[in-house]
Amino acid sequence: MEMFQSFIQYILNLGSAIFVPLIIFIIGLVAKMPLKKAFMSAITLGIAFTGMNMVIGFMSSAVSPASEAFALNTGISLPALDLGWTGAASITWSWAYAFVFFAVVIGVNIVMLLLNLTKTLNVDMWNVWGKALTAYLVYFISGSLIAGFVTAIVQVILELKLGDMFQKHIQDLTGIPLVTVTHIMNISAVLMLPVNKLMDKIPFFNKKSDTNALKEKIGIFSENSVMGFIIGLLLGFAGAYGVSGSLNLAIQVATAMALFPMISKLFMQSLSPLADAMSELMKSRFKDREVYIGLDWPILAGRSEVWVTAILIVPIFIGYSMILPGNTVLPLAGVINYSIAVGGLLLTGGNLYRMLVLGVIYTPLYLYSATYFAPILTGLANATGSVEVAKGQLITWSSIEGPEFRIMFAEAFNGNILAVIGAILFLLMFYWLNKEMKNAKIPSERYTKIIEPEAIVEE
């Protein structure tokens, strides 16, 4: 077991830009892709992930200090330190059982594929830690390790089903065939669904309002770079950066917004040949059977709606932290809430008006969840020694993904009858979402124009 952990840790230390392409390379060879073609697909995917993560990191490093300055200007001081997802991941990998979840994720996926319960093959092994984190949270609250593993298995199943239900929409939004997203952040669409259905009844929210549609209404102001410049400038002024600092922040955000769609083209170049090879393989083995490749969320990062929503929610996120009673978290490392942006994108097809409303309504959930999880993550950090925590200090993750799922199942296994009812209702709502997405028109037929590869470069 120790040797297996050392091997996996070595692979993980290579980084997602090596780990995920390596899996894609192996799958490509299994799908009988020529060696050269499989290698080039893997290399291009590694470049795409590296490029996207560099730009995301660049964006975060520009926005986070401005957010912190904005918070400091308000005089806010809260006890729980926000470490973001990187802190949560490093703590989770230190848990003794974390590496077992590679077998859990792969085993559940294989069984579901063999039983034709899913079309999604999840190759996003980098995010196995998310399942381990769920198991630990449930274990900590309920005291049952079995309950932790059961909940993690349920999470794997739900992620695969989310990959199935959103695949056509993701293909339409990205232009990449037979590719989907199996990240737990997709699950935010479950609780968003009722509000989104209510907005169906309001004519204003049924107007085309993705960035392509806005170009016809506001012209140059809808260009990625211009939107980024304006948002960055406003955030700079809110953080009291002054004219020079605000202009520099505006250019940084504009740069990231301009680069996102360009890098998205690399995902298409790398994954399209693999999708074709997998399609041919499945046709030869199973009649009329498709297999989707499940990947991490950055394949959606080329959609500017994600970033417009995420950045505009930043001051709202901080504002809520100041006024919500009982909140102990100042959002800093996790201040850019990808869960709300990605879940909103997939649910609404890129309708910016709806995405922003959903962000305003559901942001408090993440602050209260982070407050709830603070003693748990602090306890895990102290138990493993992975992160040094000062005495009396609490650490947490302000935009923790899938908090409603994790909390309700943890409390349900702890014997909380309200949580049991909540978990059942959540699963019923998940079924409702699955039904809605299967029956819904794809985004290009609802709000957006399908993206062709050339359009991504031009944007």
Image: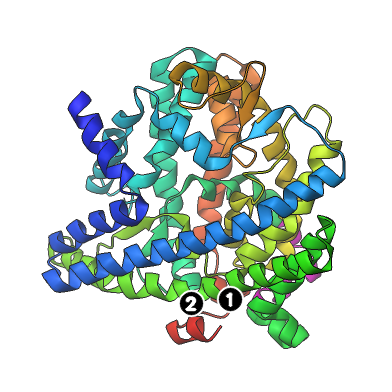
Residue 455, horizontal then vertical, whole percent: 50, 85
| Residue 380 drawn in magenta | no
Q: Is residue 248 above or below residue 125?
A: below
Specify the amino acid type for callout 1: Ala
Q: Quadrant of the N terminus?
A: top left
Residue at 58% x, 69% y: name it.
256
Q: How is the image coloured?
A: rainbow
Question: The C terminus appears in which quarter of the rendering?
Answer: bottom right
Please say whether residue 363 is visible from this viewpoint. Answer: yes
Residue 57 sits above or below residue 335 on the image: below
Against 398, residue 241 (above or below) is below
Task: Say which residue label 1 marks.
Answer: 258
Give the residue drawn at x 51%, y 15%.
142
Judge by depth and name the residue closer to the eye, 441 or 135.
135
Per the image, the residue denoted by label 2 is 262
In the displayed structure, does residue 34 sit left or right of residue 72? left
Q: Which residues are magenta?
A: 197-211
Q: Are marks 2 and 1 in contact (CB under 8 Å)?
A: yes
